[in-house]
């Protein structure tokens, strides 16, 4: 009986120990869970602090980058403006030379006509003397001698041939000066940043006229302009800058490709309509562009010209105006030693 009671007591004690052990394990697990949750909470707080700090740092970097970008754009705008002013200065010198030439021969011809008129006036005075002598009853022989003397003094045959030619040259010189001034006025007319209809054919003629001094000694310039070419919506002064840069660039390429002093190159400008776009091609037979440089020529400050001759901004301006401001396309095809073709495509309606 005692053994049974002892056995029963041992079973109860074992059961109690098992219960205590299970409860202890649960308590330990719960405690561990509580500790892990707190640690996770602390970790989340730390991560949030790190994220907030990094976010603030990124925002600060973004503000600095935006400020640097603004300064860079301002510097680039100033540089482009300086490049434009430099180009205008060079054009002004060329235009002054172009205007000086017809002005000079107009002035020379006016001087010649003035002197010829003085000779004619003297001859007419002798004729007046002859008329007075005839009225006074002098002989025909005396009158004939007076007229011959008047014709000899005036050199009438020479005057009869040269004065009309001088007057024609004066008219041509005045027309030339008027054409240059008109081209300058059309080319330099500001657009004010407003898109308007632009007659590209007329703009090409004006640009060719004002930069004549850049190409006339080294190249023949031909144009094949589509008479039915529609006007495009664009910034007239900016498109004029594009044409000017392409023509001057072609002239420089031709000059670099000339091997003899008597040789002249060729620059050819064509226009045509292609669907809903117009196409302007400026072609030269100059030195061409090496294949490895074709992708770089539109980059700002990149130039293949020697120091002092090119700023590396001309074709960068062309690319910016055509692609960014007019949503057009600019393509270059070139072979070293064969020449280059720049193709500008502009949408009729932007």
Image (cartoon, rainbow, N blue to C red):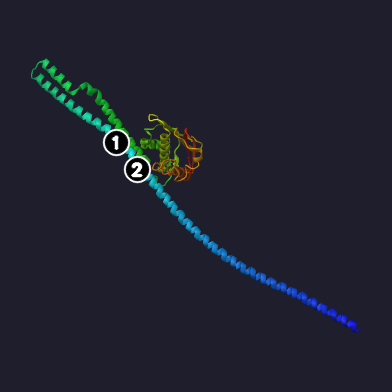
Q: In front here: 242 or 191? A: 242
Q: In front here: 13 or 156? A: 13
Q: How many marks?
A: 2
Instruction: Residue 7: give x, y in percent of width and height.
Output: 87, 80
Does residue 133 appear in the picture of this structure? yes
Q: Residues within 10 Å of mark 1 (few under 14, many from 20)?
A: some
- Tell me: residue 151, above or below residue 248: above
- Tell me: residue 148, above or below residue 17: above
Instruction: Residue 185: give x, y in percent of width and height.
Output: 35, 40
Q: Label 1 belongs to which residue?
A: 100
Quarter that holds the N terminus: bottom right
Circle 1 sits in a helix, a strand or a loop, which is it? helix
On screen, residue 142 versus residue 287, left or right, reads left
Instruction: Residue 348: give x, y in percent of width and height.
Output: 47, 40
Q: Label 2 belongs to which residue?
A: 89
- Tell me: residue 21, above or below residue 339: below
Residue at left offset 75%, top offset 73% = 25
On screen, residue 244 versus residue 334, left or right, reads left
Residue at left offset 13%, top offset 19% = 146
CA–CA distance between discs 2 and 1? 16 Å
Does residue 222 appear in the picture of this structure? no
Circle 2 sits in a helix, a strand or a loop, which is it? helix
């Amino acid at each position: 009986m005692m053994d049974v009671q002892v056995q029963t007591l041992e079973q109860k004690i074992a059961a109690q120990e098992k219960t205590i052990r299970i409860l202890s394990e649960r308590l330990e697990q719960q405690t561990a869970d509580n500790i892990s949750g707190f640690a996770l909470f602390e970790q989340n707080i730390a991560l949030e602090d790190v994220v907030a700090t990094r976010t603030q740092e990124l925002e600060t970097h973004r503000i600095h980058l935006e400020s640097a970008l603004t300064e860079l754009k301002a510097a680039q705008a100033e540089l482009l403006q300086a490049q434009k002013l430099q180009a205008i200065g060079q054009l002004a010198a060329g235009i002054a030379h172009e205007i000086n030439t017809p002005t000079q021969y107009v002035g020379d011809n006016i001087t010649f006509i003035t002197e010829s008129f003085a000779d004619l006036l003297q001859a007419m005075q002798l004729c007046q003397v002859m008329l007075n002598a005839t009225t006074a009853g002098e002989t025909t022989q005396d009158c004939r001698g007076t007229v011959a003397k008047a014709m000899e003094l005036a050199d009438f045959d020479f005057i009869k041939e040269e004065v009309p030619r001088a007057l024609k040259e004066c008219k041509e010189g005045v027309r030339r000066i008027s054409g240059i001034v008109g081209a300058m006025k059309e080319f330099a007319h500001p657009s004010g940043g407003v898109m308007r209809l632009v007659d590209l054919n007329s703009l090409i003629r004006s640009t060719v006229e004002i930069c004549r001094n850049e190409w006339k000694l080294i190249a023949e310039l031909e144009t094949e302009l589509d008479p039915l070419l529609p006007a495009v919506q664009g910034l007239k002064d900016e498109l004029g800058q594009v044409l000017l840069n392409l023509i001057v660039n072609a002239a420089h390429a031709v000059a670099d490709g000339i091997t003899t002093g008597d040789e002249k190159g060729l620059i050819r400008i064509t226009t045509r309509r292609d669907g809903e776009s117009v196409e302007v091609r400026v072609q030269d037979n100059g030195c061409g562009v090496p294949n490895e440089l074709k992708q770089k020529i539109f980059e700002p400050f990149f130039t293949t010209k020697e120091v002092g001759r090119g700023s590396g901004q001309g074709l960068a301006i062309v690319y910016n105006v055509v692609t960014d401001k007019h949503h057009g396309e600019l393509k270059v095809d070139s072979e070293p030693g064969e020449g280059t073709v720049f193709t500008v495509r502009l949408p009729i309606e932007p």
